[in-house]
Image (cartoon, grey):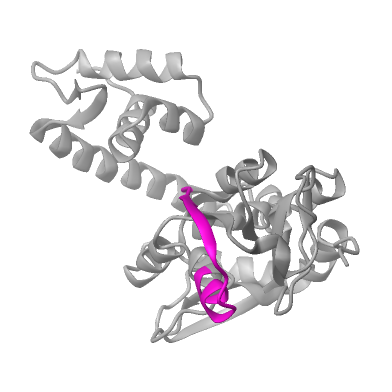
Amino acid sequence: MNYTLHQLRIYLKVTETLSITKTAEKLNLTQPAISIQLKNFQDQFDYPLIEIINKKIQVTGLGKEIAIAAESIINEIDNINYKSQNYKNKLAGHLKIAIVSTGKYIMPYFLGDYLKQNSGVDLTMDVTNYSKVLSSLLQYEIDFALISHDPENIKFEHFDLIKNELFLVGNSSSSTPLTGDKTITDSTFLFREEGSRTRLVMENFIAKNKIKIKKKIELTSNEAVKQSVIAGLGLSIMPLIGIRNEIENGLLKIIPMKGLPIQTTWRLIWLKEKRLSPIAESYLQYLEKEKENITKNYFSLPNHQ
């Protein structure tokens, strides 16, 4: 056999995502490049590792065993590289963070310069919903979780980043006046999927204020909700951080309503009993030093009243 480390990384990522498209996005490669390397890797085995059934990728029994072995090989090689760089007195290792979907508008700004300053640090950042973020945290799969609502029954430490505000928003070109409670009576509302904290906050607000919903539409990402509101499919309660450009450009409009905005704090949390790695410790030190400048440069929000 004559497979490469590059092929191992691609194969492992395909078995994790079960998607050529998602693998290409995560590895910053083209879909044809992924397909070619995957085929070259598969051709070295007498039995199939991956099968396409009903247009969906399925990993065979042998394929799963190879994936486990590939992950072990990759981890060992990465460990060798990290030790080599540490020997040269460079900070080296892996920083793993899970963030709720709206966090993608925040976290990159708090990571950019740190990664530039520490070229030996690799980053894995999983963007998912609230329940999956907490699951990763509790299973010790990550160093930090980025959330805007504190979990219950979990002992954790935290580092606050910026304030979070959630507003009721609608399509600014709607013929319905976007003022007062009359606007939202018998309206269509757009929700995130089950497991999303934004959905739970929205459901609690609607129940507390006895808002009648004409129709309920469920979408699996904040970006999908935003685009659907812009298209006029309905109203939604959304974090300002993810829609401020659309508000400034007139694509969305805040609907004033008593009890809004709902205010929370974006914060990194980690398990209280978990011992942080040297990489995680160094990242917290970086945040303590640079948080104020990052907030000033990127998150000075415009007046939305």
Q: Residue at x 48, y 48 (%)?
A: 219
Which residue, as the protein is rendered here, is positioned at the far right? 303
Name the residue: 75% across, 45% down: 174
Q: Is residue 103 left or right of residue 50?
A: right
Residue 283 x/y as whole percent = 62, 65
Which one is in front, 86 or 287? 287
- Position of 260 with respect to 250 (left or right) is left
Q: Position of residue 101 (x, y in %)?
A: 54, 54
Quadrant position of residue 286:
bottom right
Which quarter shows the C terminus?
bottom right
Image position of 110 with respect to 263: above or below: above
Q: Residue drawn at (31%, 20%), measured in percent from left and top?
A: 38
Residue at point 73% right, 78% down?
258
* Image x and y of residue 156, in percent: 47, 83
> Residue 8, located in which quarter of the rendered image?
top left
- Please tell me whether residue 216 belongs to the stretch shown in magenta: yes
295 or 120, nearer to the observer: 295
Viewer can see residue 295: yes
Q: Is residue 194 rendered to the left or right of residue 214?
A: left
| Magenta span contains residue 115 | no
**Residue 90 seen from this side:** no
Count numbered badges in the picture: 0
Q: Nearer the viewer, residue 60 or 253?
A: 253
Percent x, y for residue 231? 66, 38
Q: Is residue 25 left or right of residue 117?
A: left
Start and end of the magenta stretch?
203-220
Quarter the N terminus occupies: top left
